[in-house]
Amino acid sequence: MNWTLEVVPVPVTDMDRAKKFYAEKAGFRVDLDDEVAPGMRIVQLTPPGSRCSIAMLEGMPAAPGTKTMAPGTLQGLQVCVTDIEAAREELVGRGVDASPIRHVGATGWEDGKGETWNSFMSFEDPDGNGWVVQEAPSELSER
């Protein structure tokens, strides 16, 4: 039996502002924007080519046995691309404040691309939730 990661909740303060950021600036596809019950809204978006989506929830009670995250506390959510320079150019062109491309070197984080699997950049959504983008050597379907 496969256990597939398909939806990650992202805590935000303003659903419309976050939806606009992820759709227009980060380039995610809007899959769903629905009021599932009075006062309960779900916005679900998917990064290009991903099988895993993010969901932003408003007015929904926490699932039994779970805790809620405050907006801005989700950190290190990672996506992979095959061309980190093109990905950074696209994000910056859409108005995202993406970090420079860096890699892990002998002295820690160093500027510029590294070897295979060792090129990264980061960005934050308007609430401060932090994302990491890593360059992969090939598409997931080819690995």
Image: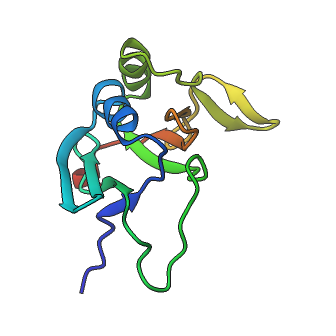
Q: How is the image coloured?
A: rainbow
Q: Is residue 108 left or right of residue 114?
A: right
58 versus 46 height, above or below = below
Label total for image: 0
Q: Residue at x 49, y 35 (%)?
A: 125
Q: Residue furthest front?
A: 38
Q: Is residue 95 left or right of residue 37?
A: right
Residue 130, picture quadrant: top right
At 36% from the left edge and 16% from the top edge, which residue is drawn?
94
Along the line of sight, the residue nearer the viewer: 109 or 18: 18
Q: Nearer the viewer, residue 2 or 16?
A: 16
The picture places residue 18, in percent across and down from the top left corner, at 39, 37
7 is higher (above) or lower (below) than 88: below
Q: Which residue is rendered at x = 32% and y = 62% of the image?
A: 7
Please identify the quadrant where the C terminus is shown.
bottom left
- Residue 134 pos. (x, y %): 48, 40
The picture places residue 93, in percent across and down from the top left corner, at 38, 12
Residue shown at 30%/78% (left/top)? 3
Q: Quadrant of the N terminus?
A: bottom left
